[in-house]
Amino acid sequence: MSERDAILAELRAARPEGEAPARDFAVIEEKRWDPAERTARLMRGMSAVKTEFLEAGPSDWPRAVVDFVRRERLDSLLYGPATAEGRALAAAWPGEGPRLAPYDRPVETFKRELFDGIAAGFTTTLGGIAETGGLLLAPGPAEPRLLSLVPPVHLALLRADRIFDTLLQAFRELGWNRGLPANALVISGPSKTADIEQTLAYGVHGPKRLIVVLVR
Amino acid sequence: MPAEMEIDFLASSTRALGDPQLRRNFRRAMDGLLAKRAAVFPDPAEWTRLRALGGAIRAKNLLKLPELLEQLERSLTKNGITVHWARTTAQANRKVLELLRARGVTALVKGKSMVSEEMGLNHFLQEHGIESLESDLGEYIIQLDGEMPSHIIMPAIHKNKDQIARTFSQKIKDAKYTEEVDELTAMARAVLRRKFFEAGAGLSGVNFAVAETGTLCLVENEGNGRMSTHVPPLHIALMGLEKVVESLEEVAPLYSLLTRSATGQAISTYFNLISGPRAGGEQDGPREVHLVILDNGRARIFQDPELRATLACIRCGACMNHCPVYTRIGGHAYEAVYPGPIGSILTPQVEGVGLRHELPHASSLCGACAEVCPVQIPITHLLIRLRREASHRTAGTTVLEAGEARSRLEDLAWSVWGWVLSHPAAYRLSAWCATRFWRLLPEGAPVLAAWTRSRAKPRAAGQSLQERARAKGVPHV
């Protein structure tokens, strides 16, 4: 018998019985806020873990990104060129100054540059979570997985009208409970640790800074 | 646990109690964790309802465990993730080694995984010439010192920053001595970034595995989990077979309970949902994802309807943070991968209640563990049950080494006690003797010595209650 079959046979032999206890999700479902409060909660939750916010309008957010990159003297910004937002960013990018670098080829061909030569990464998001703060991302062909992970600064575009009340609601509305992209994730702040004497330190393995570009 | 290690809980806990630095480190850390957890559960009504939901979800998942594991396997396979099964930790180690060797991998970078601690994976791989490097900061620190985790969430909690500063300055090449936490963190970042870059494979644990969608969930703050699972071309995930959850919806409350109970965070920095290797058109991510599902005694635990609740655990560590015993002796004294109350019910069931009979007694039964458990595991009841299992073998028991910690002296004491209590004349005589002669009993008398080592000798009254009642004219005594 294979190990698999032996394990399953032993579990089946136990013949677990009994009624499955009722599961009442109301304790989460009843958490609802109006749009202004959703945005305020998200900002509170994420600011508390050192996330920074840039507020902008639907048409001028690329300008806000450019200004930030210049102000912080970041010499390069990696982005996904295939998204509508990526195209808008490229259109607004100035001819001189910091470099806008497309992530449009397999990581194997530019791993060294990704790790050592990129100052920041820019991604879109699928939305946010009001209850706790947090951004929903589904990296993929247009915006690769390491774009939001390896560069020391991560800029993420969030539309205020895409903030869900809770993670549960986001799972349901994004249809993730029926199937997920190969990688999906929630990010609530820059990388951090408290493994040394419970003292919080930011930027341990992932980005040292997370900047949410909030579009109202 | 290495087989050659001599297990002696009494000695190890006594040693730990005598180490003032260790006790300060734990007291300070646990006080911090208690306060943080309390702050994120400000509403008792919400806590009560949410943990009822968490408990119900875990209980339901356990009722359907074999079916859910098969469903998980189907969903993962459909998503392009290869599933392996291992009955024992030795088999799991061999599976991992085979996967690495077949791809010529010589260096593995690890995210945090308690199952890999169960397997002794680092040691095993190093013996076979493969570098296995921990990347969680706490795990990295203790790996540098060749130690085991002392806490399942905060593995280096037993150390203070001076101790860590010394370790870094001695063990990391060209490192200067500093006690600044930010500088220490930056040092680890620099070393480990190189390793993520170079490693041929990444390994991780699994917090929840979703049967319906074929998804491996990973909760973390540092980003090392994402680095380990997305940068190298091969990702190997390890999970105990109890980690399966039926639906993604059920993960939402469990995740909330986990981060709040573990570290007092409303949400962790990253919540990673992995449902497949690099897909067509993707520029990065692992080419292959493999999952090893480990039994290691869990299927045996599953046989007993009461003890089965042990498998509901989501590994938040709240029970140890709140345990007066753990806080005083720390994690290493348990001489086990899982310390604290959850370890005291899990370890004896996995390794045998004979060998580990002392662990269920490492509790004052104050009930704090059960009170804070986010999935309502009745830990105190299970501790008492295992105490009984250790000394009395009942027919049909599935507990490993049941009855093997039976003591003749204890049996004799109870039969004498039982006989005396059921014979009124003997009872009266013994009460009379106890009240008159207790002073004559030396403090160091056998059995009594165990009590008087750290407590005063009990004092008996001058007369028994019965005698006094009779003297007062109470009828029928």
Image (cartoon, grey):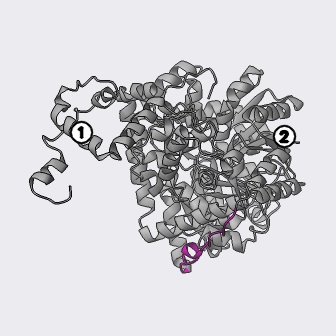
10 Å crowding of disc 2: few (<14), some (14-19), many (20+)? few
The residue closer to the viewer here, A154 or B294, is B294
Number of residues whose C-alpha sits closer than 10 Å to that of mark 1, classed few (under 14), some (14–19) or many (20 or more): few
| Residue B343 locus on image (x, y percent) | 54, 41
Q: Which residue is mark 1?
A: B429
Amino acid carrying label 2: it is Glu
Q: Image quadrant for the C terminus of chain B?
A: bottom left
Q: Residue at x 69, y 56 (%)?
A: A122
Please report, as a chain letter, where disc 1 is located.
Answer: B
- Give the number of the mark in front: 2 or 1: 1
Type of amino acid at the residue the image marks with label 1: Leu
User: Is disc 2 in the same subunit as disc 1?
Assistant: no
Magenta residues span A17-34
Counting the numbered discs, the total is 2
Residue B197 in the image: x percent, y percent? 74, 35
Residue A25 image point, x, y percent: 60, 73
Going by the picture, which residue comes out furthest to the bottom? A34
In the image, residue B234 lies in the stretch drawn in magenta? no
